[in-house]
Structures are given as C-alpha cells and as structure tokens.
Amino acid sequence: MANGKETDRRSFVQGMAGTASFGIAGSSAGAQSPPARRAGMKITAVEPILTGGNVFVKIETDAGITGYGDATNNFIPYSSEGMLKDLIPYLIGEDPERIEYHWQACFRRRFYRGGPATGAAISGIDMALWDIKGKAYGVPVYQLLGGLARTKVRVYGAVSGNTAAEAAAQAKERADRGITAIRFRAFHSYDAVDLHDHKLAVRQQIEYLAAIRKAVGDDVDLILECHGRYDPEWAIELARLSEPYRPFLIEDPIRHENPQAMAQVRAHTRLALATGERYHNKWDFRETIVNGYVNYLRPDVCHCGGISEMKKIAAFGEAFYMNLIPHNNAGPLGTAATLHAALAIPNVVMIEAPWVNSDGKTDVVSPFPKVEGGYALPLDGPGLGIRFDEKLARSIPFRKPGLQPRLNAPDGSVRDF
C-alpha cells in the first residue's frame, strides 16, 4: 500500500494533468487560456489554411484545445488541400488522442492510397493531433514519443549559387557561424536556361565540390545533392570523381521510381548514399531498406505521414542499421515537428535546417529552434512548442506555385528536375 507521501505525490501529478497550461500554440500569437483536459474530448472542426506558400491544418476540439499541422507540399498545394478536405469526415466527432487510429483510418479507409497528396494531408493531420495531445498533457511532443533520445540535434545548412565561387563564399559564411554540415547542388545556372546535360552537370558538381571543400576545410561535412538528376552510369561517374573531396554522402543520385536501380550505384562506390524525401510512407521505403541500397534514409515529416510514420520508418531502418537524416524544407511548424521526432528517435544523425541559411525571421508561425554550435536545441512549451498567428495567416493571400524548370537534354528530350 502506498504511504501518505506517495498518495500526495500521485494526487499532485493527477491534478497537474487536469489543469495543464496550453499557452504556446494558440489561435493567435498570444497564449491560449488553459482549458482543463477532460475525458471524452472530441474533434469539432478541421480546416486547411492556405497562406503565403503554405498549407496548414487547424484541428479544434470541444475542450478548447487547438492543434496545428503543416501539410505543405510546395509542388502540389491544391492536391494537398483537396485530400485534407476528403479526410475531414473521418475526423469530426472523434477523440483526438487516438492518433494511431486516425492515421490508420485516413490511410486504410481510402480505396486509393499513398502518393504525395495523401502523404502531405496525413502528415498535417498527424502533427496537429500530436500538438493537441501535448497541450492536453502540458508537455512537449517529444516527451510523449518516449522522451529525449538526445539533448540536441545536429543540423545542416545549404548553399546555392550560379558559380562555384558564389557557393563557396556562402559555405564559408555558414561554417564561420558554427554550422558543421553543408548541403549543396550545382547546375543552378543550367536550370535558368532549362538545360540538363549529364556530362556538364557532373563537371559542375565537381567544380562546386572542390571550391566548397577548399573554402571550409576538412572539418565540415559536405552533402552532395543530386536531386535525382542522373542516370545510374553518370551517378557512378560523379561518385568516382567526388572521392578525393570526401563528401559525407551523395543524396538522391538517381530518380526514385525504381529503387532497385540504386543497386548499380551502390555496387560502384564506397561513398555513403541517401534517399527518401520523395517517399510517402513506410511501404515506399521497404525495398530500399531491406536491400541496403543506401546508408541514410531521408523521410520528410510533412510528406511521409507525419511524426507517427517517421518513427515507424526509423524503427524499420534501425533493424537494418540504417540512420536517418530527415529532409526538411518547411517553415517553423514543420521544422518543430521534425525536431520533436528527431529528439526522440535514436537513429537520427542530423536534420535539414533551412532557417540557418538566412536571418531565420518568421511571421505567421514562430519560432525556429535555437542553434548553438551546429546543434538545434529543444523547443520549450507544450505540444509542438510554436506560436501560430492565425489572424495574420488568414490575411496573407496564398501564392499560386510557379512552374518548375522545364528541363530538356541538348537534343530536346525531357530531363528530370
């Protein structure tokens, strides 16, 4: 039987759970009032919010707790919005704490499944539900995921530029600020004229790689991004020429539709390979994982099915001794979800950190995580630990996405972006 002190401790903890503070991510930039969590909470409304270049998800409950998620896919925003609207009926009136149940319902009760629109929509819903649950219990999401597997997460920045000198200067600036890993791709100048030629692109990648390595020295890890541009034989040639410059890994060297083709690249290079930003659930990753085609998996929390699915992909990879470097080109909301997952998942090596490439200022959603010594620190506050200014979001018109480069080979045939 528990003694009096133990009984008092339990009563205190139970009381805290019932009166938790929910302040960080309210329906405006200010704090929400702290509604008491109660049994039988129900979802009352689900709404896509299109603002600027983003597709957000708002989920409201009858307990006065609101959660937000990021369903942005920059290339197909209207498809993401449409899928969200298709999934809303599966959520209204349901218990928001049944996160796994809702993931399964939104995926498996659809006759046609998978793909980028479904992945983005379920990702946004999943994030919003975790946000609600964290607020309901007054704890950060990473605590609900099993707690801190690490106390900080290594980040990488990115550089661009139409010349190798321009990219190298950006890389030195990032390194001087303490960023210890940098991703880059070349062929920006060829994008501007809608051209992709494998030989020219390989030559330019090596030119950029050499210049950046010289600018930042040997202690900064370089990620060679290929954007799925190359046919396998050209990816093999790129890897061969890259070896003297010691890239940390080569990302997406070939297209993603046929994972087995990666075996050709794998067999011809000692360099680490990575892929996964264009996979949308655990089944998309299956062939790549079980066959060991790459060293690192690159799920994106806004595309792969959210925090819940990223944990499963990570566990699947862990069984094969594969680590994660999550893709993340999101704003603060998707970044917050990425960080919470990365803090709790044991086999994460680093995460993409687009906010370190600029001043990191935010408006509709804030803040970005603080970075010290090349590592992102945990966000404070319950749920995802972000503030969402809904009034401002609704005042910003949605920007219709532009066309991607219409890349052709020198002979006029289609090439991949």
Image (cartoon, helix red, strand yellow):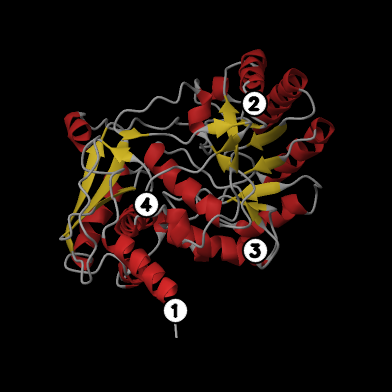
Quadrant of the image occupied by residue 258: bottom right
**Marks 1, 4: nearer the viewer:** 1
Q: Position of residue 173 (x, y in %)?
A: 62, 17
Q: Is residue 360 above or below residue 137?
A: above
Q: Secondary structure at mark 1?
A: loop
Apparent side of residue 263 relative to residue 58 in the rendered image (left or right): right
Q: Quadrant of the N terminus?
A: bottom left
**Marks 1, 2: nearer the viewer:** 1
The Cα–Cα distance between marks 3 and 2, rounded to whole angstroms, is 29 Å
Q: Which residue is mark 4?
A: 120
The Cα–Cα distance between marks 1 and 2, rounded to whole angstroms, is 52 Å
Q: Residues within 10 Å of mark 2 (few under 14, many from 20)?
A: some
The Cα–Cα distance between marks 1 and 4, rounded to whole angstroms, is 50 Å
Residue type marked 3: Glu
**Marks 1, 3: nearer the viewer:** 1
- Asked whether residue 295 is in view, the answer is yes
Q: Are discs 1 and 4 less than 8 Å apart at CB? A: no
Viewer-closest of 196 and 20: 20
Q: Which residue is mark 1?
A: 3
Q: Which mark is residue 178?
A: 2
Q: Position of residue 295 (x, y in %)?
A: 70, 53
Q: Which residue is mark 3?
A: 318
Q: Which of the two discs, 1 and 3, labels the residue nearer the N terminus? A: 1
